[in-house]
Image (cartoon, helix red, strand yellow):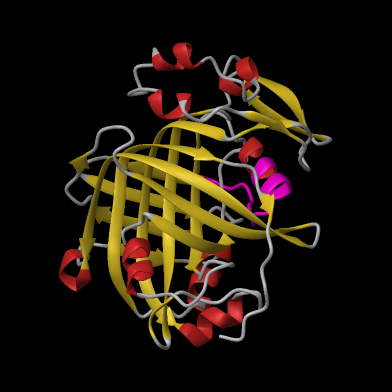
């Protein structure tokens, strides 16, 4: 499928020997990951760039060739539906080195997530994910505080099973550069202060997974007031790596429990995302988080030690 509108001019760029198309005159075409923050600040869709001025970019070698890190996302909206699932089903999908983060013994946390990147260094795209909350790779026994901060979406560690996108450059960078299970498909994500909807297409154009819910009431935050982090674990060329994603929350809200999530509709169809979610055997929704406005900095993965786990 085309990852940019058919009536939009594109140019080809090389990423580690792979040619991908990007919008002509877009942020990647103009800046190649080295943005002019003053120019981006003038975009009416961007509320500010102070968060990014504190994060200088560095040049690194990677499987997609030399690149600058982190990748800046200037205007982002996200949704995350968190569910309880049996630890046994979760462990069956995790590499043996990783262990599920359990709310209580025998029950772990899994999520379906949706992302809309309105303005970013690699141009507009949408994304969806099925992920598992895991114990930090180099952390001792977890306590109640770790669970609370995890559920608050402040400091999470995860292992991702599915990560479809609707952009060629996002797929190549994510798959080849980060080791994520990414593929390109039709993927619609719409998030505003009233409603959150998403639809992920399968290979035949039908529904892989669809979602609809009322957006929780939003609370505004000053830039830098609430900054969360997500650490994801992947294998690249046989070695474990960790990827840090920092999120600057600007407007967000949460509903919890059965009553708070009764309006949520999650449709499982036929496809990779639905298959992955079914394999986890989710039992009950415990939380629904929506960020109608935020920003993010996605760092390139770094090698990490992931010791074998017996629990």
Q: Is residue 311 left or right of residue 154?
A: right
| 39 is higher (above) or lower (below) than 201 | above
| 185 is higher (above) or lower (below) than 55 | below
Tell me which residue sits at (41%, 56%) in the image: 155
Q: What is the x, y in percent for residue 260?
A: 18, 65
Along the line of sight, which residue is nearer the eye, 105 or 120? 105
Q: Point out the image quarter for the C terminus.
A: bottom right
222 inside magenta stretch: no
Tell me which residue sits at (29%, 39%) in the image: 225
Segment colored magenta: 173-186
177 inside magenta stretch: yes
Tell me which residue sits at (61%, 60%) in the image: 233
Q: Is residue 183 left or right of residue 39?
A: right
> Residue lying farthest front?
140
Q: What is the x, y in percent for residue 103?
A: 36, 78
Along the line of sight, which residue is nearer the eye, 19 or 83? 83
- Give the total of numbered labels: 0
Tell me which residue sits at (67%, 73%) in the image: 307
Q: Point out the image quarter for the N terminus.
A: top right
Q: Is residue 60 left or right of residue 27?
A: right
Q: What is the x, y in percent for residue 215?
A: 23, 50
| 10 is higher (above) or lower (below) than 196 | above
Q: Is residue 302 left or right of residue 158?
A: right
Q: What is the x, y in percent for residue 229?
A: 44, 50
């Amino acid at each position: 499928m085309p990852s940019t509108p058919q009536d939009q001019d594109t140019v080809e760029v090389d990423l580690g020997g792979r040619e991908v198309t990007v919008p002509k005159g877009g942020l990647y075409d103009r800046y190649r990951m080295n943005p002019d923050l003053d120019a981006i600040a003038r975009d009416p869709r961007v509320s500010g760039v102070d968060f990014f001025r504190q994060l200088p970019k560095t040049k690194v070698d990677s499987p997609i060739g030399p690149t600058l890190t982190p990748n800046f996302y200037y205007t982002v909206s996200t949704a995350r539906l968190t569910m309880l699932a049996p630890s046994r089903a979760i462990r069956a999908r995790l590499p043996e080195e990783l262990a599920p983060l359990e709310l209580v013994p025998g029950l772990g946390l899994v999520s379906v997530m949706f992302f809309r990147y309105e303005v970013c260094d690699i141009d507009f795209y949408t994304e969806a994910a099925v992920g598992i909350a895991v114990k930090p790779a180099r952390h001792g026994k977890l306590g109640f505080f770790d669970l609370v901060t995890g559920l608050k979406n402040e400091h999470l560690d995860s292992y991702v099973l599915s990560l479809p996108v609707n952009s060629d450059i996002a797929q190549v960078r994510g798959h080849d550069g980060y080791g994520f299970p990414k593929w390109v498909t039709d993927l619609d994500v719409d998030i505003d202060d009233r409603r959150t909807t998403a639809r992920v297409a399968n290979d035949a154009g039908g529904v892989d997974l669809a979602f609809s819910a009322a957006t929780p009431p939003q609370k505004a935050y000053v830039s830098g007031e609430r900054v969360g982090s997500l650490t994801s674990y992947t294998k690249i060329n046989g070695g474990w790596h960790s990827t840090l994603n920092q999120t600057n929350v600007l407007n967000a809200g949460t509903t919890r429990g059965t009553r708070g999530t009764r309006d949520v509709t999650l449709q499982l169809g036929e496809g990779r995302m639905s298959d992955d979610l079914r394999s986890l055997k989710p039992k009950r929704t415990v939380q629904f988080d929506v960020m109608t406005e935020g920003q993010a900095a996605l760092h390139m993965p770094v090698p990490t030690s992931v010791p074998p786990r017996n629990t």
